[in-house]
Image (tube, helix red, strand yellow):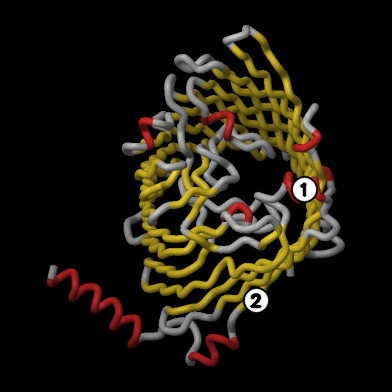
């Protein structure tokens, strides 16, 4: 213990007494800081068959400003402000998109103190986190964020170790965090527990995680992560949730293209009393094969199966997704118990035929759920999706994007031996200018 304390003291003293990189003074650290920003104008439209109350379109705008100081004795400060506004939103749009797109106001999504020494980086405060089990989604007008502390170390050859503690979460809108409809997003001791819900937040009392990425073997990436979310409150029940993740990905370079092979295994467990009322003690096993950089083309196929009796929790934040998640409707259907899920992707980079900045995606995904125990229903989903992304060459920083997905949900009701089908069509258009 004494040696550990002396070692930590030595690191701190070394950081405060040497400044081999970065600004020469605190004033210079602020002067030499970097600023960047983004303007967004996004339109989303959702149409659900025979469900007018769930169908609406919304136009949302945002301004995002980021500033990070230069390093001073290894220390830096950073912050990101996100301001959102949804002009002329209809009453229907306000209700349909209250959890993810509708709101007006601003939130300081990042406000952190960073410290780098050697191959170790520490960040404390509000920050974006992107790991397999803890990940804030950026697919809505405001990006999800976390408050806590993270530390990343790369001293071991080919290995990155990341640890983190989280005590607060910032959702997409104020309503998602338990506030009023129309409020801007803010931080609170509530979080998305993806798998239980994709839009409702649940109270929690601290979360910690550790992740390891190893690339010691050429072309092979091994990833493992564990997450514990403390005292998650669902209704009147409260207990810890444990989530684990492992992944092996191998890229085989060929003559003019690359082959990729992947294996993925993840699962979750809930302590008492939650596990007596919700069934999320399941596993998800997946495999993937892909080809890329083949004259601009790419293609992949992924297949997965969940455990027979229990669904899984994917992690904290809507960014924690499965490998069979679809473009817009995401991975919720692939995480239910006793479900097989599949996803086919095809991509093309049009720069290969002289259209710089234009990329396309086509996607087909489906899930098939068998009956779970004495459950009265089961659901199958079929999705067709496509997207275009265009980095406009004539105006550097401007990106135009359009996405569309149609999904059919077939539900079997065993009590009456009847089947119902509901189609959901979603269109998303994004115009973003980064500066």
> Which mark, residue 389?
1
On-image quarter of the C terminus? bottom right
Name the quadrant containing residue 428: top right
Neighbours of disc 2 within 10 Å: few (<14), some (14-19), many (20+): some
> Which mark, residue 35?
2
Q: Nearer the viewer, residue 40 or 174?
A: 174
Asked whether, in this view, residue 26 is left or right of residue 402, the answer is: left
Q: Nearer the viewer, residue 221 or 329?
A: 329
Asked if residue 39 can be seen in this view, the reply is: yes
> Which mark, residue 303?
none
Which residue is farthest left?
Answer: 2
On-image quarter of the N terminus? bottom left
Locate residue 387, reporting x and y percent: 76, 40
Q: Earlier in the sequence, mark 1 or mark 2?
A: 2
For mark 2, give the secondary structure.
strand
Locate residue 238, reporting x and y percent: 38, 44
């Amino acid at each position: 213990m004494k040696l550990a304390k002396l070692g930590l003291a030595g690191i701190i003293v070394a950081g405060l007494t040497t400044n081999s990189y970065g600004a020469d003074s605190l004033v210079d650290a602020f002067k030499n800081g970097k600023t960047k920003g983004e303007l967004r104008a996004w339109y989303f439209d959702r149409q659900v068959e025979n469900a007018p109350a769930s169908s609406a379109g919304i136009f949302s705008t945002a301004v995002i400003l980021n500033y990070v100081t230069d390093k001073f004795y290894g220390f830096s400060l950073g912050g990101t402000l996100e301001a959102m506004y949804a002009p002329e939103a209809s009453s229907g749009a306000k209700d349909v998109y209250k959890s993810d797109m509708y709101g007006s106001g601003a939130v300081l999504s990042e406000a952190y103190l960073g410290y780098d020494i050697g191959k170790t980086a520490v960040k404390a405060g509000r920050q974006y986190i992107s790991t397999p089990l803890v990940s804030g989604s950026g697919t809505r007008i405001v990006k999800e964020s976390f408050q806590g502390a993270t530390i990343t170390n790369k001293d071991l050859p080919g290995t990155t170790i990341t640890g983190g503690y989280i005590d607060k979460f910032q959702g997409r809108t104020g309503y998602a965090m338990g506030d009023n409809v129309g409020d801007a997003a803010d931080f609170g001791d509530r979080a998305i527990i993806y798998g239980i819900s994709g839009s409702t937040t649940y109270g929690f009392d601290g979360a910690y995680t550790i992740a390891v990425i190893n690339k010691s073997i050429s072309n092979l990436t091994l990833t493992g992560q564990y997450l514990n979310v403390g005292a998650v409150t669902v209704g009147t029940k409260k207990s810890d949730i444990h989530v684990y993740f492992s992944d092996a990905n191998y890229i085989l370079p060929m003559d003019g293209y690359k082959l990729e092979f992947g294996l993925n295994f993840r699962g979750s467990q809930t302590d008492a009393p939650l596990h007596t009322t919700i069934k999320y003690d399941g596993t998800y096993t997946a495999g993937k094969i892909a080809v890329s950089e083949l004259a601009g083309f790419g293609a992949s196929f992924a297949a997965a199966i969940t455990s027979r009796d229990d669904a899984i929790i994917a992690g904290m934040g809507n960014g924690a997704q499965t490998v069979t998640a679809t473009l817009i409707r995401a991975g919720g259907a692939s995480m239910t118990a006793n479900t097989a899920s599949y996803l086919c992707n095809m991509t093309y980079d049009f720069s290969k035929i002289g259209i710089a900045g234009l990329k396309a995606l086509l996607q087909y995904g489906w899930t098939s759920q068998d009956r779970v125990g004495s459950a009265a229903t089961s659901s199958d989903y079929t999705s067709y999706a496509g997207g275009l992304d265009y980095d406009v060459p004539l105006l550097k920083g401007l990106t135009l994007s359009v996405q569309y997905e149609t999904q059919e949900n077939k539900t079997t009701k065993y009590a009456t031996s009847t089947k119902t089908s509901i189609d959901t069509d979603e269109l998303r258009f994004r115009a973003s200018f980064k500066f």
